[in-house]
């Protein structure tokens, strides 16, 4: 056979790490075991153009689709982080979003979720994201969704990963914006990082906002452009 790709093995290791992260959070483990770091081949980074972003947001979208897209585009959330958002994670008055793990009782089951880096973070809400989230939160609340998922799924569970991906796919199709296979939502997260870095936000702040594990993960978004080079040299004339 063809065997298993490094990327697939790395993904499975992350699942195991998440399980140990939960056990550590519950104080059932003294420490999280050390796992090998795999070198996953990097692909060229692509981002959403301004024109495609505008077209996507102006398309005929459901309130759930718009909220999902803006959570990735304006707050840098990953798919799993979007799925596990709850009403209590949003501070409306302060316009702040908490992104973190949760432990939820669903009947006789205990449902757990950990972020990729096992840490919580706070992300300020843009005005358009706040409006989209408010509409989706109201719609989810109107359904009597328990236990408070912003994007409720079946039987008190959060929206499934496949359903989330399908909603994003339908949004791209409605807007007639082309995207590669399996990169629809992550394309928006990459755009989030690239836009901030391009606007001059320091890389440490971008790392904290998006929950990246290290600065090296963001280096590929720092592609130099003729405009940036001219701006850099112009600083010498000011000094």
Image: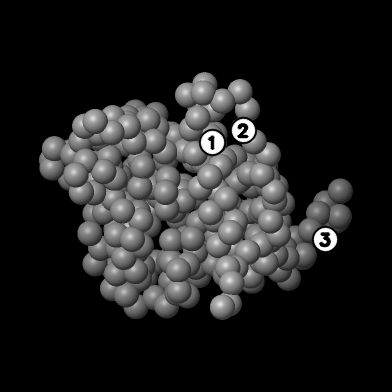
User: Which tag is nearer the camera, tag 3 or tag 1?
Assistant: 1
Q: Which residue is mark 2?
A: 32
Check the image and name the residue furthest to the front: 1
Compared with residue 12, is residue 110 higher up or lower down, i.e. above or below?
above
The residues bearing labels 2 and 1 have C-alpha atoms spaced at a distance of 6 Å
Residue 144 is left or right of residue 190, and the answer is left
> Between disc 2 and disc 1, whose residue precedes?
1
Quadrant showing the N terminus: bottom right
The spot of residue 120 in percent (x, y) is 51, 33
The spot of residue 94 in percent (x, y) is 39, 29
Task: Inspect this view and state whether residue 225 appears.
Answer: yes
- Which label belongs to residue 233? 3
Q: Residue at x 45, y 68 (%)?
A: 182
Name the secondary structure under disc 1: helix
User: Contact, CB < 8 Å: mark 3 with mark 1?
Assistant: no
User: Contact, CB < 8 Å: mark 3 with mark 2?
Assistant: no
The quadrant in which residue 198 appears is: bottom right
Q: Residue at x 77, y 65 (%)?
A: 230
Q: Which residue is mark 1?
A: 20
Residue 7 is left or right of residue 187, and the answer is right
Task: Inspect this view and state whether residue 121 appears.
Answer: no
User: Which tag is nearer the camera, tag 3 or tag 2?
Assistant: 2
Q: Nearer the viewer, residue 160 or 1?
A: 1
The spot of residue 223 in percent (x, y) is 70, 65
Name the secondary structure under disc 2: loop
User: Contact, CB < 8 Å: mark 2 with mark 1?
Assistant: yes
């Amino acid at each position: 056979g063809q065997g298993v790709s490094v990327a697939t093995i790395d993904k499975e290791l992350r699942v195991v790490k998440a399980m140990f992260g939960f056990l550590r959070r519950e104080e059932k483990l003294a420490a999280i075991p050390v796992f090998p770091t795999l070198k996953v081949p990097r692909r060229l980074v692509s981002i959403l153009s301004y024109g495609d972003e505008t077209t996507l947001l102006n398309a005929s979208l459901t309130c759930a689709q718009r909220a999902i897209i803006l959570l990735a585009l304006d707050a840098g959330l990953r798919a799993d982080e979007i799925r596990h958002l709850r009403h209590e994670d949003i501070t409306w008055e302060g316009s702040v979003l908490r992104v973190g793990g949760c432990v939820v009782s669903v009947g006789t089951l205990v449902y757990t979720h950990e972020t990729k880096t096992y840490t919580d973070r706070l992300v300020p809400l843009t005005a358009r994201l706040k409006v989209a989230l408010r509409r989706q939160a109201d719609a989810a609340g109107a359904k009597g969704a328990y236990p408070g998922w912003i994007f409720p799924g079946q039987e008190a569970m959060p929206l499934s990963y496949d359903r989330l991906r399908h909603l994003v796919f339908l949004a791209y199709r409605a807007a007639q914006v082309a995207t590669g296979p399996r990169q629809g939502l992550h394309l928006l997260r990459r755009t989030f990082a690239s836009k901030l870095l391009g606007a001059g936000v320091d890389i440490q702040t971008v790392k904290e906002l998006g929950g990246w594990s290290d600065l090296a993960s963001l280096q590929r978004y720092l592609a130099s452009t003729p405009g940036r080079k001219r701006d850099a040299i112009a600083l010498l004339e000011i000094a």
